[in-house]
Structure formats: C-alpha cells, structure tokens
Image (tube, rainbow, N blue to C red):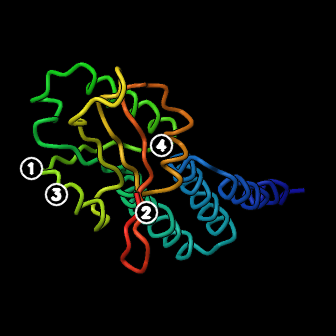
C-alpha cells in the first residue's frame, strides 16, 4: 500500500509521452517535454538513483528544452523577400501594409513568424528565391493586372502556397507557385 504513489508517478511517464507525441503546436510540445523530463527525474529519485535523477533533470530537461526552444524558434520563420523601397518603415502604401498584416495573421495561425527581407533589385530578389534564401517574394506589379491587384506574391514552398491560397482573402495580390526543378529548369 505504501508503493501506490510510486505507481501513480510511474504511470505519468507514458501519459506525458503520449501527450508529447500528439502535440501539433511545437511550443506546447516543449512544455510537455519539460514535464516528461521532470517526471522521469522524480521517478529516478524515488527509486534511489539520485545520480540518474540529477542527470535527467539537468540534461534531459533543462538543456534539451533550451536547445529545442532555440531550434523551434529559428525554424518557424517564413522569410518574405521584398524590395527595399517596400519596407514597412519606408513605404507609406496602405495596400502593402494591409497585405503584410494579412500575411502575418495567416502565418500566426500556423505558428510561423514573418520576417521581411529587403533586396535592392528584382534580379537579386529572384536569385534569392531560386537559391532558397527566402520562402516567398512580394513585389509591386509594374502594370496593374486588375483594378485591385497591385502586388505579385511568388511562393516556392508548396505547403505554404496552399495555406496562403486557401486563407488569403485580399484581392491586392496575385499568388503564384514557383518550383525550381532538380534539372535546373525553372517554372513559374
């Protein structure tokens, strides 16, 4: 009867591991990973393995969570190439600012952070898209195709293209998918 609490603590290990595996939000997964490490350290301490408990607490919980947090934060960035004159600070165009706000609201729902990367010329912007320095580009059209479409957004990641295509309601931009084939051919 004295070991009942031990069985309850040990039962938390597969429970938290199951919760960890089913998480879709990477930040929630980080928190649950910390809980899993703390429960494992507690089980080790209760069972008399203080050295293993200390190692689990320091390495398995604190260090791994810190490294995972850095990795998750850096990998959840969508780099959008724009022209230098289009940067939010320099650009007074309300349409562009509204379009960027629309992009941010879409990407925030998918736990992505939008980073605007300015380029001096359209050639360098296109080259950055080809060399996979950026995930998408947004440039002002020289000729207005329709009355409201003033920007062209080119996305090279199929999943991001599908997300933006289904969720963007702004008529201010045309969307295109850009695929650099392995053979070096470019399709737009």
Q: Nearer the viewer, mark 4 or mark 1?
A: 1
Q: Which residue is drawn at 43% across and 30% down?
A: 105
Location of mark 2 (residue): 179
Crowding at dot 1, Cα within 10 Å, few <14 / some 14-19 / many 20+, comes out as few
Of marks 2 and 3, which one's residue comes earlier in the chain?
3
Is the Cβ of the residue at disc 1 closer than 8 Å to that at disc 3? no
Q: In this view, does 34 lie to the left or right of 153?
A: right
Q: Residue at x 43, y 72 (%)?
A: 181
Q: Based on the displayed image, in which of its 4 quarters is residue 173 positioned?
A: top left
Query: Is residue 107 positioned above or below 10 on the image?
Result: above
Mark 4 packing: few (<14 Cα in 10 Å), some, or many (20+)? Answer: some
Which residue is under mark 3? 123
Q: Mark 1 points at which residue?
A: 120
Compare marks 2 and 1 and give the one earlier in the sequence: 1
| Towards the viewer: 153 or 47 | 153
Left or right of 160: which side holds 130? left
**Alpha carbon of mark 4 to alpha carbon of mark 1: how far?**
29 Å
Q: In the rendered image, which quarter contains the N terminus?
A: bottom right
Judge depth for marks 4 and 3 and give the one in front: 3
The image shows a total of numbered marks equal to: 4
179 is higher (above) or lower (below) than 106:
below
Give the structural element (helix, strand or loop) at label 1.
loop
CA gap, disc 1 to disc 3? 9 Å
Q: Position of residue 78 (x, y in %)?
A: 36, 49
- Residue 16: name its quadrant: bottom right
**C-alpha separation, residue under disc 2 versus residue under disc 1:** 23 Å
Q: Where is residue 97 in the image (x, y as percent from the top left)?
A: 26, 25
Indicate the position of residue 146 as horizontal and vertical percent values.
36, 26
**Residue, disc 4:** 111
Dot 2 falls on a residue whose secondary structure is strand
Distance between mark 2 and mark 4 Cα atoms: 24 Å
């Amino acid at each position: 009867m004295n070991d009942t609490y031990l069985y309850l603590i040990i039962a938390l290990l597969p429970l938290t591991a199951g919760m960890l595996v089913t998480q879709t939000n990477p930040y929630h997964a980080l928190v649950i990973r910390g809980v899993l490490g703390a429960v494992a350290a507690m089980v080790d301490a209760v069972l008399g393995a203080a050295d293993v408990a200390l190692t689990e607490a320091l390495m398995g919980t604190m260090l791994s969570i810190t490294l995972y947090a850095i990795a998750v934060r850096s990998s959840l960035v969508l780099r959008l190439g724009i022209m230098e004159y289009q940067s939010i600070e320099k650009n007074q165009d309300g349409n562009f600012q509204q379009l960027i706000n629309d992009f941010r609201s879409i990407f925030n729902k998918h736990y992505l952070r939008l980073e605007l990367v300015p380029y001096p010329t359209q050639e360098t912007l296109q080259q950055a898209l080809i060399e996979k320095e950026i995930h998408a580009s947004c440039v002002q059209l020289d000729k207005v195709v329709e009355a409201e479409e003033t920007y062209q957004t080119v996305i090279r990641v199929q999943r991001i293209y599908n997300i933006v295509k289904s969720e963007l309601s702004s008529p201010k931009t045309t969307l295109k998918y850009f695929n650099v084939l392995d053979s070096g051919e470019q399709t737009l």
